[in-house]
Image (cartoon, helix red, strand yellow):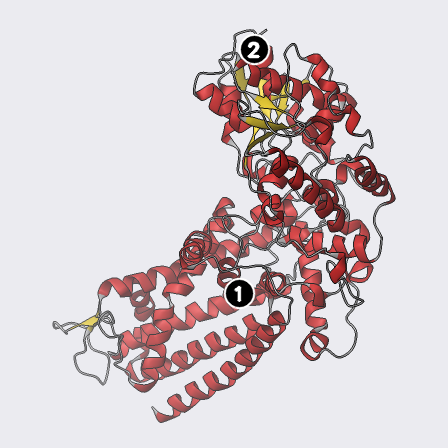
Amino acid sequence: MAARIIIGLLITVICGAIAGRRFYWLSRLIRSGQAAPRRWNGFAPAAEAEVVEVAGQRKLLRWSVPGTAHFFTMWGFTVLLLTIIEAYGALFNRNFHIPLIGTNGIVAFIEDFFSVAVLVSLVVFTVIRIRQAPARKDRSSRFYGSHLGAAWLTLALISLVIITLLLYRAAQINTGHFPFSHPFTGWVGYGGPLPGHGPLPVASSWAFASKVVASWLHPLGYGVNSTLEAVFLLANIAVIMGFLVFVSYSKHLHIFMAPVNVAFSRRPRALGALDKTPDMDMEHVTEDTVFGAGSVRDFTWKQMLDFATCTECGRCQSVCPAWTTGKPLSPKLVIMGLRENMFASADYLLSGEGEPERLVPTVIDPDVLWSCTTCGSCVEQCPVDIEHVDAIIDMRRYEVLMESRFPSEAGLMLRNMENQGDPWGLGSSKRTDWLAALDFEVPVVAESIPEDVEYLYWVGCAGALDERARKQVESTARMLHRAGVKFAILGPNESCTGDPARRLGNEYLFQEMAKANVATLNGVGAKKIVASCPHCFNTIKNEYPSLGGDYEVVHHSELMGHLVASGRLVPGINYTGTVTYHDPCYLGRHNRIFDEPRNVLSAVPGVTQIEMERHRERGFCCGAGGARMWMEETIGKRINMDRTEEALGTGADVVSTACPFCMIMLDDAVKASGREDVAVLDISQVVERSLG
């Protein structure tokens, strides 16, 4: 007894010290990051996130087979913490049991059930890995770039944890030291009392798996079983502690990091507004001022926590529109690269001595950085709530503001925004040209919004200046007018919200334009704003509040949905056909507006809706976001072509959307496909067609 106590404690102390030192080092490394915006929103939101994301495995269960296997493995290890307590108790007392519950047969069943469930899950993982082995070196696989060798060792270690657990529990049954037993009733286990030993308690039938293994060991006799009990008890403790050390040095660090990362993730979602609004007051700029992230030291502690939490599961990679169309950007490889750089820069981060490595182009290739459309698919799919988009935007900020390095064609867009107030450089005088297509008057606000006006209509640059997007705005205006909604526009006083500049990385230009717009909106007394462009909608609703602009902002699909539901807008019967709806990224994933546009289309009697395979949260990007609309797409397949092929594959007559950027990109791709029989229309245009 004394020997196994010494051995068990020695194993625990040595492995605990190694793992503890590693976790302390990781804690110091992560805390060396820059200050992050307020991340703790209170116990209730954090608890909800833990229940839904960690305990409920919500995102993982979307991938049915591997998700279910992971669910049982995670819960197996959680439940089997009870067996760890029992193992350490058995070191000191062979008859130990957990107080109150330690002899309850139901607890024994739960422990055995999850032991078997974990083993079955490991078989599933093994089969998946073997079957997908040829694809794991293929760039098209979501596993591309993962550290695969460690995964096999993980499966082996988890298997050993469960196997040694069942073996020492089986030996306990045969020696009479199993906690879950009931008094002897005249017959023991399998074939009567063990040789050399009198009547023993009988193991509870609830411990079904342990009893099966016990039947295999029973013929070995009491002495051998007594030895096996000690050996496998120590082996179980050794494997558990060895696994702890392994986890602390591997990608499986997420076992401990994920609950922490989820607790500090943005709520209700890590999309919409960017994480932080840097102080761009030039009066406070010094030689030491750094905008964005040029090296790993410039990231926040939360971003460093993101890097350390990555599971390398590849779900972000598998849905990224850039990666799946042959571009070099993989959100997974970006996070893995930043994590490896963080570890390599640990001496600098912890001591401040030396100079950290520049991220671009050394760690992150420029083509990787500029391929991102900021669609948010990676963030939406990540099971541990990593915020890839914010890290990419921070690196773009450094490149644009500190190094003046960005794609050359984006320079024209930035100059146009700075000089003319719009990305096309057409100027404010053109912002009311679209009104000529209307047969009613729309007030153009100069000083203050008239009292009878309910909404200020934020038309947006595309809606006012692009010929195709104008059709969307014209139809929306006519539908609002038909429903009796009083609205006005800013006309020449409206300017770009700054979204393209911000997503490109020019935070200074964004803030200058945003502050000017906030001053204009506050000056005219804006309270309720309706926007047709999801990018404008997202910026005014989610990002202007930090700059002093608090308004009630709705998207035109939301307003039209309300008007249809209330009977103020009744679609007609003059359109009949099939429609497939494309979810704009900044309306859907970023702002969770999925049902309203579909409800509007469903209200049209002649519309039959057909969903694309990738829709709602999994909707595929059109390729215009992240300022990509103004940059050439020379690598791989065009994203808008990929999406349009999927839309055309539904056989729909109309590809509908609720975003001017998406309309332009999809219309270009439909024309390039030679499909003149398919129209690209905003939901408002579909409703208007139904009215004849």
Residue 509: percent from the left, percent from the top?
A: 76, 46
Q: Secondary structure at mark 2?
A: helix
Q: Relative to 159, is 25 on the left or the right?
A: right
In depth, the one of 555 and 584 nearer the eye is 555
**Residue 89 in view, yes or no:** yes
Q: Pointers 2 and 1 in contact (CB under 8 A)? A: no
Residue 426: percent from the left, percent from the top?
A: 82, 29
The residue pinned by badge 2 equals: 690
The residue pinned by badge 1 equals: 257
Numbered circles on residues, count: 2
Amino acid on which the number 2 mark rests in the picture: Ser
Q: Residue at x 18, y 75 (%)?
A: 201
Residue 321 position (above or below residue 438): below
User: In which image quadrant can residue 348 be found?
Assistant: bottom right
In depth, the one of 617 and 534 nearer the eye is 534
Q: CA distance from mark 2 to mark 1?
A: 53 Å
